[in-house]
Amino acid sequence: MILQDLHSHSNWSDGENTIEEMVTAAIDIRLKRFAITDHVWRNSPWVWDYLKECRRIKEKYRDKIEVLCGFEAKCLDINGSIDILDEVAKEADMVLGAIHRIPKGGGNFFTRREIYREPTQAFNFWFESTLNMLSNSLVTTVAHVTAALNKYDLNVFLTEKYAKKLVKQFGKTGKEIEINLRYSDPLPIVLRFMNKMTKYHIGSDAHSTKEFLAAWENQLNRVK
Ligand SMILES: [Zn+2]
Ligand SMILES: [Zn+2]
């Protein structure tokens, strides 16, 4: 298994460090592949400059590490559309789709109050959006796949039936499950249905070199 981390942020979005600082931290702990996946919106004006800078760093360190220049884009609706322009997504090395708030469509999201009032409906929207994001050809994979359930106290709705379906959808679409170190995601019930055919990778989701090193130190201690 290749030592890699396919989810991280730099100061191009809400991270603290530059792309170069993040990449050199990854080289220091001997990762072989590392993705910068800054948060993006369809109207983010900086995307091309970001890709240019990321590619400069990718080239500079190519003998030491494979850098992937990517994005994390939020899910916009139940069809699994994400908040990135097609032409930008196609230029990137990878695109993470993510649910931070559960989409209702039309640019709207469930409020916390609405979720507490109608948890079943919110869960169903979460589930459909997630499955459809996995089918979206622009999406490399879905980040922290069950973190929104945890955030909105919807874990109990992810029964065996749904967890099984979710893992199956990853397999069917050929996408890898992200083991997200920031949120300790996915939930154990998802891990339980993963088998030796299930593909996965680690994403620290680190927003600084400090967070990155702490997350990986933890991880490496666990396997020692
Ligand atoms: Zn995220
Ligand atoms: Zn992230």
Image (cartoon, grey):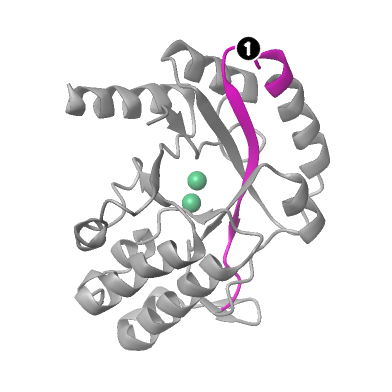
In the image, residue 195 lies at what x, y percent?
A: 25, 55
Vertical side of 215 occupied by 178: above or below: below
Residue for point 42% across, 22% down = 210
Vertical side of 224 occupied by 81: above or below: below
Residue lying furthest front in this view?
197
User: In the depicted view, which residue is nearer to us: 196 or 137?
Assistant: 196
Crowd around label 1: few <14 · some 14–19 · many ≥20 (10 Å): few
In the image, residue 68 lies at what x, y percent?
A: 62, 34
Q: Quadrant of the N terminus?
A: top left
Q: Is residue 102 visible?
A: no
Q: Quadrant of residue 76?
A: bottom right
In the image, residue 50 lies at what x, y percent?
A: 75, 35
In the image, residue 223 lies at what x, y percent?
A: 19, 27
SS at circle 1: loop
In this image, 114 relative to 69: left or right?
Answer: left
Q: Is mark 1 within 8 Å of ligand 2?
A: no
Magenta stretch bounds: 58-77
Q: Is residue 111 visible?
A: yes
The amino acid marked with disc number 1 is: Asp
Residue for point 64% across, 42% down = 70
Q: Quadrant of residue 121?
A: bottom left
Residue for point 34% across, 40% down = 181
Q: Does the magenta portion include 202?
A: no
Q: Quadrant of residue 153?
A: bottom left
User: In the depicted view, which residue is nearer to us: 223 or 186?
Assistant: 223
In this image, 209 relative to 58: left or right?
Answer: left
Residue for point 33% across, 62% down = 151
In this image, 19 relative to 146: left or right?
Answer: right
- How many numbered marks are there? 1
The residue identified by callout 1 is: 63
Q: Quadrant of the C terminus?
A: top left
